Amino acid sequence: MCGVVLDLIYWRDAKKTGVVFGSTLVLLLSLAMFSVLSVLAYLSLVTLTITISYRVYRSILASLQKTGEGHPFQSVLSRLFSASSCYSALVRVRIGSESIVKCVDMLVSADLSVYQHIS
């Protein structure tokens, strides 16, 4: 078994284990009470709300401190969307299944990198 999983099982770091098991418990209880689509919709809504709140907080903080900081997610966004690579693949007259799979893979990996960057 992976060392990280063993650390979680043996509660070597109580904060991380509590967060993982607590969120897993909430997810399982939510799935028991609501449909999968509802749970995904609410998780997406919570993620969007947190992201927008963080963006507004950073903008207000930058304006009060009079710093020239830009968008807090600019480094992530510039890395994810390189000069319309996904857009150009989808706009083609003949959209091949390979280009759609490539764009979906790129969006999923971008989603994972944003999650890893935030946590």
Image (spheres, rainbow, N blue to C red):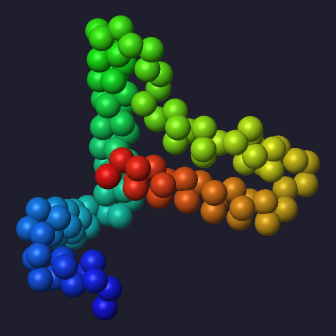
**Compared with residue 118, is residue 62 higher up or lower down, i.e. above or below?**
above
Farthest residue to the bottom: give it: 1
Residue 38 location (% of width, % of height): 33, 55
> Whole-percent x and y of residue 94?
90, 54
Of residues 90 and 29, the one nearer the viewer is 90
Name which residue lies at 65% across and 42% down. Answer: 81
Which residue shows up at 70% across the image and 42% down it? 82
Q: Is residue 12 rendered to the left or right of residue 36?
A: left
Rendered position, 56 above or below 110: above
**Tally of marks:** 0
Q: Where is residue 32 in the image (x, y as percent from the top left)?
A: 21, 70
Up the image or down, 43 lies above or below 54; here it is below
In the image, taking residue 11 as reference, residue 82 lies left or right, namely: right
User: Residue drawn at (55%, 53%), measured in percent from left and top?
Assistant: 110
100 or 4, nearer to the observer: 4
Q: Can residue 67 be seen by looking at this rendering?
A: yes
Residue 21 sits in which quadrant? Answer: bottom left
Camera-nearest residue between 79 and 25: 79
Q: Is residue 26 visible?
A: no
Q: Is residue 97 left or right of residue 42?
A: right
Residue 102, image x, y percentages: 72, 61
Q: Which residue is drawn at 69% across and 56% down?
A: 103
Extreme residue in the right direction: 93
The answer to which image quadrant residue 99 occupies is bottom right
Locate the N terminus by quadrant: bottom left
Q: In this view, does 93 lie to the left or right of 58?
A: right
